[in-house]
Amino acid sequence: MPRFLSAKPDARLIPLPWDTPLAQWPIEHLVALPRGISRHVVRFVTVDDQVYAAKEVAEHLAIHEYRLLHDLMRLGTPSVEAVAVVSGRVGADGEPLDSVLITRHLDFALPYRSLFSPGVRHDTVLRLLDAMVVLLVRLHLLGFMWGDVSLSNILFRRDAGAFAAYLVDAETGELHDRLTDGQRAHDLEIARVNIFGDFCDLEAGGLLDESLDPLGLVETIESRYHELWNELTGLEEFSGSELHRIESRVRRLNALGFDVAELDIQTSPDGRTVSMQPKVVDAGHHSRRLMRLTGLDTEENQARRLLNDLDTFRARRQLQEVDEAVVAHQWLTECFEPVVNAVPAELQGKRDPAQLYHEVLDYRWYMSQHENREVPLLEATAGYINDVLRTLPDEAMSGDAMVQVEGGGRRLANPYDPSMGYADEDDEDEGPAHDPWEDAAAQADAGPDGVLDIDALREKG
Ligand SMILES: Nc1ncnc2c1ncn2[C@@H]1O[C@H](COP(=O)(O)OP(=O)(O)OP(=O)(O)O)[C@@H](O)[C@H]1O
Ligand SMILES: [Mg+2]
């Protein structure tokens, strides 16, 4: 009889065929979704409408990873959520089987293999690298030494015009009180070697845009890591007449999406020089504020965008004197909810609500520019649903999203195990995996159809 270790048990998992090796599970329990490369057998399992990731691994490793993921979640790090460890499994032949670590499937996660593919814009790539850097810096700030940073161990989600990165594989991780510079450098070196290898693999498979070179990409990651780390933790010294620099530093950190919980400020005995160093910084400046005001749980850049819209709403309605929480409630019921509720059920798997709202705002901006009038929000929503949303691939990845997302229409040899490659692997004519969203965004450079890329449009305008 298998044992379940779980803080939040899901009883629907218990009847699953635990006496069968994961690789041989009947497909009625599985869903085929995009996945990174892995050493262990990993399958996506469904019970009713919930999708879980199951990884078969030795018991002590499963428990170690379960606990670490739990700690990371408690500390508010973007990582997948540990659900259970199933151990004590015995096969039909009486032989013991490895344990299974179960995590909640991260909905709306994008497969990295399509993100760097030919045709991807340079801007997009930089944003992906930035998302990775923010994740690594956040982990290091918490004292988490990853030990196995790689593209397969990171999941990306859309975050307004940027991306948010999530940790998916904590098996080799260690949580310390704080990391030494040496430990951080070591982790960064691992990241460098692994990610360089990942990019070379993509390149060899024709899946990396030609303008991107693996070495340049990892160097960008390193330099951006140092920039961000210094901005968040660096010591700054200035003269006693420049005290405004304290305020500026806090604002800069806020703009990067971080709150300063503790700032160490010291003045020299003669008062001439001041030194300042952030001691505790927390990511999620904007998303916390939005959550407080509206209860919406979003990524950081999505929150920034929604808060801007909230401010605009307040100014337009001349509600500056009204309490912010009251205005937020009004904005939620008069703007956000009507837009999200306008999406037909069959299209809801394509974007999470905050991302959808962000894209509708972009669409409305473009449409207003194009038609030289103020387009009402719901009119823009209808246009967006028909012109954009219908043509996008599903990204929710629950149940019906299936493998076409991964292969741009190509068939996998085994849809439940993407590591086995494509059924038509030898077929040279097949294009590489592509993301139709990227196609749509790329057109923004070329013509008026690219409704999604607000930055490119602004530059043109
Ligand atoms: N909760 C989840 N949500 C979405 N995708 C997931 C989840 N868990 C795992 N995956 C996918 O499965 C892949 C393999 O998982 P994981 O990295 O944990 O396996 P692994 O065998 O430990 O890998 P490694 O070879 O790096 O040790 C990941 O790259 C990711 O794409
Ligand atoms: Mg992995």
Image (cartoon, rainbow, N blue to C red):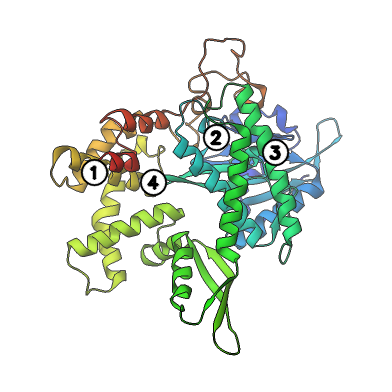
The 10 Å Cα crowd at callout 3, few under 14, some 14 to 19, many 20 or more, is: some
Instruction: Give the vertical position of 117 relative to 147 (above or below).
Output: above
Looking at the picture, which amino acid does disc 4 mark? Answer: Gln
Q: Within 8 Å: ligand 1 and the Cβ of disc 2?
A: yes
Label 1: element kind: helix
Read off the residue under disc 3.
194
Nearest to the observer: residue 93 or residue 379: 379
Instruction: Name which of mark 2 and mark 1 comes first in the sequence.
Output: 2
Q: Within 8 Å: ligand 1 and the Cβ of disc 1?
A: no
Read off the residue under disc 2.
111
Residue visible at 57% across and 9% down? Answer: 427
Residue visible at 50% across and 38% down? Answer: 125
Instruction: Give the vertical position of 96 relative to 410 (above or below).
Output: below
Instruction: Name which of mark 1 and mark 4 comes first in the sequence.
Output: 4
Label of residue 246 in the image: none
Nearest to the observer: residue 271 or residue 345: 271
Instruction: Give the vertical position of 235 relative to 298 (above or below).
Output: below
Read off the residue under disc 4.
355
Separation of marks 3 and 1 at Cα, in angstroms = 41 Å
Whether residues under marks 3 and 1 lie with C-beta atoms below 8 angstroms apart, the answer is: no
Residue visible at 74% across and 34% down? Answer: 39
